[in-house]
Image: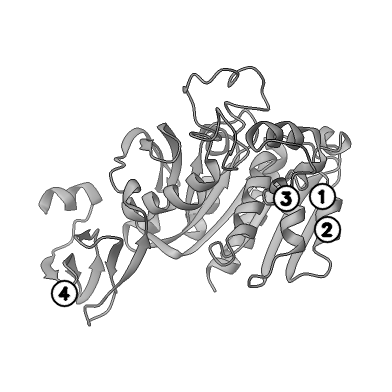
Amino acid sequence: MDKFLKKKKFNLSYQINCVITTNCDIIVNIIFRGHFEALRVCTLSKNKMHRVSLHKDVQSKPLAHFDDKYKMSELTEVESNKSFEGWQKVYTHNSAELGCKMKFAIFIPPQAEKEPVPVIYWLSGLTCTEANFSQKAGAQKHAANYGVLVVIPDTSPRGLNIPGEDDSYDFGTGAGFYVDATCDPWKKNYRMYSYITKELPALINKEFSTLPSKQSIMGHSMGGHGALICALKNPGQFKTVSAFAPICNPIKCPWGKKAFSGYLGGSEDNDVWKEWDATELAKKYNGPPLNVLIDQGTEDSFLKQEQLLPENLLHAVKDSNIETNVRFQNGYDHSYYFIATFIEDHFKHHVKYLDN
């Protein structure tokens, strides 16, 4: 236990309690100043993990539910840099969904040393890795200010040696499009949707001090498409969603048609494609009210090439309970200069809904 405390940088006097519940959950607590401070919980039950409530009555509540196949993933820290009193880190782990070793970046705000914090997932665009957003967007200052943990996964599986995976920038490596592929040879490993919505959140909630009921998602370009469909396909899982220059209607644009034909098969007449298209999903969304913020640069070359099609999404949400604010930013392009300019607005947007 002393080793654990050193790792977590607790330096206060402490009293240890260990409780074994009727469900065989082993709950270990440290009492600081008369309050229970929750630590990681070991569990012997099949599908539940628990965190202890922060009050005098020691109760346990569900922390996360995850399949058996996700339980054995171990994290390896490969980078760590202090930033705004928090920590910008990179980890690797073996992904059950993707069948390969994956990297993700994570910013841990200073508030996480004292209490569980909300989580924002960031999904990056074509050709990107887990590094682009963490190194270019200037997000750490805002994440530290608002006390949110930011998770930045890679954009595809890597190193699988699938024929054709490295042939182009917009399909295969670095271009997973956040779908679960159904066509060979991609369907075994290209399951980025399940990785983002199931495996990765289970891992993050297991290993870090988080509030699993308070998570949201945002992204850029292909990652904006990913953020939108993850929120629309899982009503209530994400408190809100935002995007920079997202691919809003992939079944109608060249990028999307290429990716979907390869991963899902067929053509745009294939109804399966609609299940992975934000504009189509918005037409039938029947979940709780969802507030969407989108920033789009007017000088974005991909907007002019009709790869992004935000106007189609705006038309689709007219009669829905999806409140969508698309801000066209004069003179801005598709780059991280654009993202860095408006990223604070997106943190403010997310915190508004994460705090509720």
Front position in the image: 89 or 190: 190
Is 228 placed left or right of 247 in the picture? left
Residue at the (11%, 54%) spot, across then down: 1
Disc on the earlier residue, 2 or 4: 4
Question: Residue beneath label 3, please?
Answer: 274
**Foreground disc of the pair 1, 4:** 4
Q: Residue at x 45, y 38 (%)?
A: 104
C-alpha separation, residue under disc 2 versus residue under disc 1: 6 Å
Task: Give the number of the disc on residue 22.
Answer: 4
Label 1 element class? helix
Query: Type of residue at label 3?
Result: Lys
Q: Looking at the picture, how far across and down is residue 58, in whole percent?
A: 21, 78
Earlier residue among tags 1 and 3: 3
Q: Give the residue number, with chain letter if any, for mark 2.
A: 314
* Amino acid type indicated by mark 4: Thr
Indicate left or right for 146 with 88 as reference: right
Contact flag, marks 2 and 1 (Cβ < 8 Å): yes
- Give residue 213's position: percent from left, percent from top: 45, 67
Please tell me which residue is depicted at 69% across the width and 66% down the height of the picture: 291
Q: Which residue is mark 1?
A: 310
Mark 4 or 3, closer to the camera = 3
